[in-house]
Image: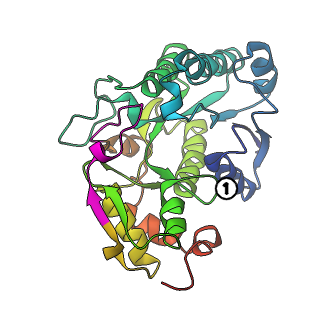
Amino acid sequence: MTTNWLVTGAAGMLGRDLLAVLDADPEAKVTALRRADLDITDPAAVRAAVEGQHVVVNCAAWTDVDGAESAEPAATAVNGTGVRNLAQACAETGALLLNVSTDYVLPGDAEQPYPEDAPTSPVNAYGRSKLAGEQAVAELLPQTGYTVRTAWLYGEYGANFVATMLKLAAQRDTLDVVDDQHGQPTWSRALAERLAVLGRAALAGRAPAGVYHGTASGRTTWFGLAREAYRLSGLDPERIRPTTSAAFARPAVRPAFSVLAHDRWAEAGLEPLAPWQDMLSEALRRPGFADLVPTSN
């Protein structure tokens, strides 16, 4: 049976990967809408876009973490009100909603991985804006709304930490990278594949609604990620040197601990996502990353 999928934010890093995943599914009929195609802050436009869809995956978001500090109402309009518009339209039409959220809704002060039901307490404006979206999904779609939190996302399309580190290898002999923030580097393609699987499981009634943590298994720091990216790319990892967050003052506070637990996947009959090292190894073999590695190391 053909399933109608709507992907918002289709031109972004995750959106492009999700389109590639769904394109391989002969039963998926996909409507891909970029920011220029759909303003999710426009309720009427959202209702029209959602009409006739079975699954809506929201990859549209305000992603400028530092910019949100001085423009919180604008960030919340997209990440909060825009998600509420999608949730309301899905409630009216019966469509499922998978909304991509973030570890930044959590306080980042834990010592053990955060479970899916951990109390939220964002430390910056971006996190508050994303929490508003999570709350809208929970309120309006208690049985058909899915919040998938991700973190430290990287991929072949768009700016991201891994790509930046590889590009800088050709420009600098050494790089100082933060070693006091802990998280789970997650490949956008792996997350896209899981979103597609979760959507199918939800349609089949196998996946309960609520919060899921869409991050890689294991944990590391930005320093550890950079070193592993260099090692896997044939570069000298000793070129990466550890430093602290204090060396890179930024407008928005970053959570020190962004490690998430993955127990909820078992309720949908699914294993957690792969270890971050395995993801990274596979990702770096893709042309989008391999082409960034300097020919002279």
The amino acid at mark 1 is Val
Q: Residue 146: give x, y in percent of width and height.
A: 51, 31
Check the image and tell me how it is coloured: rainbow
Q: Is mark 1 on a helix, strand or loop?
A: helix
Of residues 289 and 111, the one nearer the viewer is: 289
The residue sitting at the left extreme is 111
Q: Residue 210: give x, y in percent of width and height.
A: 45, 28
Residue 125 counted in the magenta span: no
Dominant SS of magenta comes to loop
Residue at left offset 41%, top offset 48%: 215
Q: Residue 217: give x, y in percent of width and height.
A: 34, 55
Q: Is residue 263 visible?
A: yes
* Pointer 1 residue: 21
In the image, taking residue 160 as reference, residue 241 lies left or right, namely left
**Quarter location, residue 155:** bottom right
Residue at left offset 60%, top offset 44%: 200
Q: Pick the quarter of the image with the N terminus.
A: top right
Is 242 rendered above or below residue 125?
below
Q: Can residue 275 be seen in this view?
A: no
Highlighted magenta segment, given as a residue range: 241-257
